[in-house]
Amino acid sequence: MYALLAWGRPLDHPKGFLVLSFIAWKMVLLCIALTSPGPGYDTSTELLHPYLNLAPEGSGSTWKPASRLRSFLRWDAIFYTQLARRGYLWEQEWAFGWGFTNLMAVTSRALGSIGHLWLLGPEALAAIILAHVFHLLSVMMLHELTLTVCPKSTMTRISSFCVLAASLHIISPAGMFLSAPYAESPFSFLNFAGYYLYAKAMLEHGEGRENQRDALILLSGVVFGIATTFRGNGLFSGLLLVWDALACGTRVLRFTDIASNARRLLTVSISGLLMACIAIVPQYLAYDEYCVRGSTDSDKRPWCSYWPPSIYTWVQRQYWGVGFLNYWTMSNLPLFILATPMLFILMRSGIWALQRSSSSEISAYKGNRESIEISPPLRIDEAIALRLAIPQIILTALALTSYHVQIITRLSSGYPLWYWWLASWILEDRKTSLTGRKWSTACIISRWMVIYAIMQGGLFASFLPPA
């Protein structure tokens, strides 16, 4: 009965509607994984664990739904499960999120031998479960974050916008990467959670709330730091704290409300330090292993003498060819074409937030706040939207110029601003004139998201690019 109510009246039961929509979408992806033709051109999955060889993927006589779940173990998922099982052995493996592999290892020990019964291994089963759980949690967190940044005007309009934004995250073009042993799902949840704590802190006003506001800011730094141990691009979220530190510092230098702004400057500075201390843990462990313990000056790795001595930066450049314009080759042109829609969405939504934000100074925790009009009478907080545009635009620029550009479709899943932009266009029902006809831009983008996620899911399950 509740399921029928949630489907029929999503605004009355928004979380129930989101859960049912999430299950329906995951069932679509699961069917794609179960019916994929096989391992494709790469059989690495069969070499992952000894017990996986008992039922080769190409063996028709051993076809079982449980064994077919190995279709989730493709590309980087093999590295993640391998690292969760035996730890980091080789230098290049430090490119994969230390936080996620350790969480997988802890969860797999809790599962015990259950994973063997599924012909997957406990690490792989743990990672698949974690990916699904964190994706659902990130959907709910995005819903709460959206509620937080929308000043209460018309509740029906706000509810529609929040449910729509969270629903778009369900059908994110990241697709199968939010179900497979990848760090995208937990990163999305942690990044949304950090933004939620940050937004709550910015919206805390009045006497007697300073302690609560400071605690929220400190917690946001901790969460951003943890998120960075899952995916390196989590560092960009620290720019929100840098922005506030500069704004408060400027106001202190101008002798504007010195006591209050000095306190806020101290708080965001400590929050940034907490984030940095957590984010640096994997780097410190790698430095200790390769540059301190058991190493002489003659056999130290080159990056040990760099400043900062980051194994992650070295590995990305040395083994994956990451660097400015390194990916700009004719052979990679199809990947740029595949990534173009997502690059456009991220950049366009970032500019949307910047254009609608005031050109005047927007300081941290400003009491008299402005809002960006989305669709009358719905608005979102201007200062928060402006800040969230910064990491998103930087990520987009780096993906275009320095990263493997195709990964932007999955990296984008952890950034809320573009979901708000697309949801606003859907509510406004904007149309674009082309070839004498009017097209709904939001409708085209939404259909592209679904089609891309389904096609990419089929290719992923068959161990075919793009990844």
Image (tube, rainbow, N blue to C red):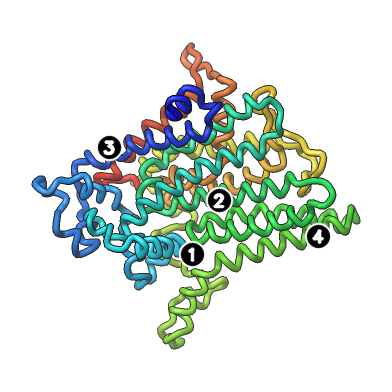
Q: Type of residue at label 3?
A: Cys
The residue beneath circle 1 is: 313
Q: Type of residue at label 1?
A: Thr
Q: Type of residue at label 4?
A: Arg
Tag 2's secondary structure?
Answer: helix
Mark 2 and mark 4: Cα distance apart in space: 25 Å
Position in image of residue 376 (x %, y %) = 68, 22
Indicate left or right for 216 with 306 as reference. right
The residue beneath circle 2 is: 191
Position in image of residue 262 (x %, y %) = 83, 60
Tag 3's secondary structure?
Answer: helix
Q: Type of residue at label 2?
A: Asn
Say which label, 1 or 4, has the lower sequence index: 4
Say which label, 1 or 2, has the lower sequence index: 2
Q: Residue furthest left?
A: 61
Mark number displayed over residue 60: none
| Total number of numbered discs in the rendering | 4
Mark 2 and mark 3: Cα distance apart in space: 29 Å
Say which label, 2 or 4, has the lower sequence index: 2
Q: Quadrant of residue 371?
A: top right
Q: Residue furthest top?
A: 436
The residue beneath circle 3 is: 31
Say which label, 2 or 3, has the lower sequence index: 3
Mark 1 and mark 2: Cα distance apart in space: 21 Å
Q: Please determine whether, in this image, residue 376 is positioned above or below residue 229.
A: above
Q: Is residue 149 visible?
A: yes
Indicate left or right for 176 with 383 as reference. left
The residue beneath circle 4 is: 263
